[in-house]
Image (cartoon, grey):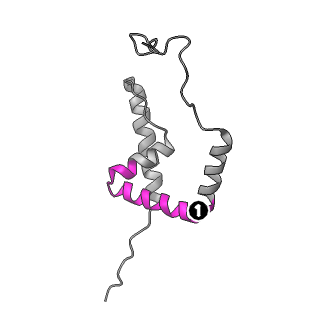
Amino acid sequence: MSQPTRDSNGRFVPGSPGGPGRKPREVEKEYMTTMETVVSGEAWRAIVERATTDAIAGDAKARTWLSGYLLGQPISRVEEPEQNDKVAEAIEQWRVAQLAYAPKPVEEPEE
């Protein structure tokens, strides 16, 4: 029987073989180059504008996607109350700023 690779806490024990690790930097560069040639700056802008419009309209997935890019992924820990207030304030400032740039509805001319 082979030797265990993890201890009772699930951590790797010294001498355990490593995993495949991250992809080589050259592969990451190739992926990014491919994405840049397929998704133009204009296309990306349209995607972000649509996500912003959807988030303001109440789409939770669009809000989560945008906040992941703008604020980073949430941390799995309990925040202090004053920190929560700061986060809430930052989110509110972001929301107000986004509303300023949101497409305005076209008004029908009065007859």
Segment colored magenta: 37-63
Q: Residue at x 56, y 12 (%)?
A: 15
From the viewer's perspective, tell me whether residue 93 is left or right of residue 60.
right
Q: Quadrant of the image for the N terminus?
A: top left
Residues 70 and 39: in front is 39
Q: Position of residue 42 (x, y in %)?
A: 58, 65
Residues 9 and 78: in front is 9
Q: Residue at x 37, y 25 (%)?
A: 81
Residue 52 in which image quadrant: bottom left
Q: Position of residue 30 (x, y in %)?
A: 65, 50
Residue lying furthest front in this view? 1
Q: Is any atom of residue 101 visible in this view?
A: no
Kind of residue at disc 1? Val
Q: Position of residue 45 (x, y in %)?
A: 54, 61
Q: Is any atom of residue 2 visible in this view?
A: yes
From the viewer's perspective, tell me whether residue 12 is left or right of residue 24.
left
For label 1, the residue is 38
Secondary structure of the residue carrying numbered label 1: helix
Residues 31 and 15: in front is 15
